[in-house]
Image: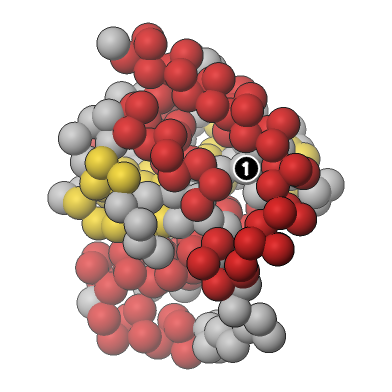
């Protein structure tokens, strides 16, 4: 099984490393970190990661996955990346995303008419790209699989592995990584966090969210 994860500048590393940890434990799977070249890629919080293959050398993947993060905004008009995703999607068994990677799939025209989810703060942008927004931790619609924000990538990956390789395999991977979340606060969603916490977070996110919305609208206009 060939699994490709898009590694691009200013992505949120957990969007990628969460699913990577799950996918890399699937028996017989080969996981590729894919970018235009093999230069180190800096994530949005400073961590540097190395691609393992470039676009030109990437094999046809059974699973292609697009993480999210602030760098997703630039990808919305990056024809080289969007064309790569379209080519991979044409032959992939599963076309997937985590967090705002769903918007990149949407910009490539790969979510039209599909139920999908993304990070709560950008969820309302899915419909602009022809997707059907669903407020779930992960969503499987035919061969499109989308995960919610950041940490949802682990849940998304386990759910996909259960579909691809069986529930026992997914359960064994979950046990192997001791994925038994018990967060100290019920603040992982807007509902749980409450208005006071939302009011603390929204001003910091506002400039980036405005840029993201502009990029989504521009991509939607190209799709027609």
Quadrant where the N terminus is found in the figure: bottom left
Say whether residue 182 is visible.
yes
Residue 11: percent from left, percent from top? 65, 42
Q: Is residue 166 above or below residue 16?
A: below
Quadrant where the C terminus is found in the figure: top left
Q: Residue at x 66, y 57 (%)?
A: 198
Labels in figure, total: 1
Residue 39: percent from left, percent from top? 73, 33
Residue placed most toward the observer, 74 or 175: 74
Extreme-front residue of the structure = 195
- Is the residue marked by circle 1 packed among few (<14), some (14-19), or many (20+) residues within 10 Å? many
Left or right, 177 with reference to 155: right
**Image quadrant in which you'd find residue 54:** top right
Residue 114: percent from left, percent from top? 22, 41
From the image, tell me which residue sits under label 1: 69
**Image quadrant in which you'd find residue 17:** bottom right
Residue placed most toward the observer, 22 or 131: 131
Residue placed most toward the observer, 70 or 49: 70
Q: Residue at x 44, y 81 (%)?
A: 173
Say whether residue 17 is visible.
no
Residue placed most toward the observer, 73 or 94: 73
**Image quadrant in which you'd find residue 58:** top left
Left or right, 115 with reference to 152: left
Extreme-right residue of the structure = 46
Q: Is residue 179 above or below residue 63?
A: below
Element type where label 1 sits in the image: loop
Q: Is residue 87 above or below residue 31?
A: above
Q: Residue at x 23, y 68 (%)?
A: 163
| Colouring chosen for the image of the structure | secondary structure
Q: Residue at x 57, y 58 (%)?
A: 150
């Amino acid at each position: 099984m060939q699994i490709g994860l898009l590694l691009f500048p200013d992505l949120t590393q957990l969007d990628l490393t969460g699913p990577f940890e799950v996918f890399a434990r699937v028996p017989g799977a080969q996981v590729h970190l894919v970018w235009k070249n093999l230069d180190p890629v800096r994530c949005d919080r400073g961590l540097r990661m190395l691609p393992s293959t470039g676009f030109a050398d990437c094999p046809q993947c059974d699973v292609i996955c697009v993480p999210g993060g602030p760098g997703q905004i630039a990808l919305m008009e990056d024809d080289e990346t969007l064309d790569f995703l379209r080519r991979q999607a044409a032959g992939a068994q599963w076309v997937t995303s985590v967090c705002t990677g769903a918007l990149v799939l949407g910009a490539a025209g790969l979510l039209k008419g599909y139920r999908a989810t993304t990070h709560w703060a950008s969820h309302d942008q899915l419909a602009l790209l022809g997707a059907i927004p669903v407020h779930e931790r992960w969503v499987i619609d035919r061969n499109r699989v989308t995960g919610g924000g950041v940490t949802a990538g682990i849940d998304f990956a386990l759910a996909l592995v259960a579909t691809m390789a069986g529930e026992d395999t997914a359960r064994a991977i979950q046990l192997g990584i001791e994925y038994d979340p018990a967060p100290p606060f019920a603040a992982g969603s807007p509902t749980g966090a409450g208005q006071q916490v939302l009011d603390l977070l929204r001003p910091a996110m506002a400039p980036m969210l405005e840029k993201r919305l502009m990029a989504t609208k521009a991509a939607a206009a190209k799709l027609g």
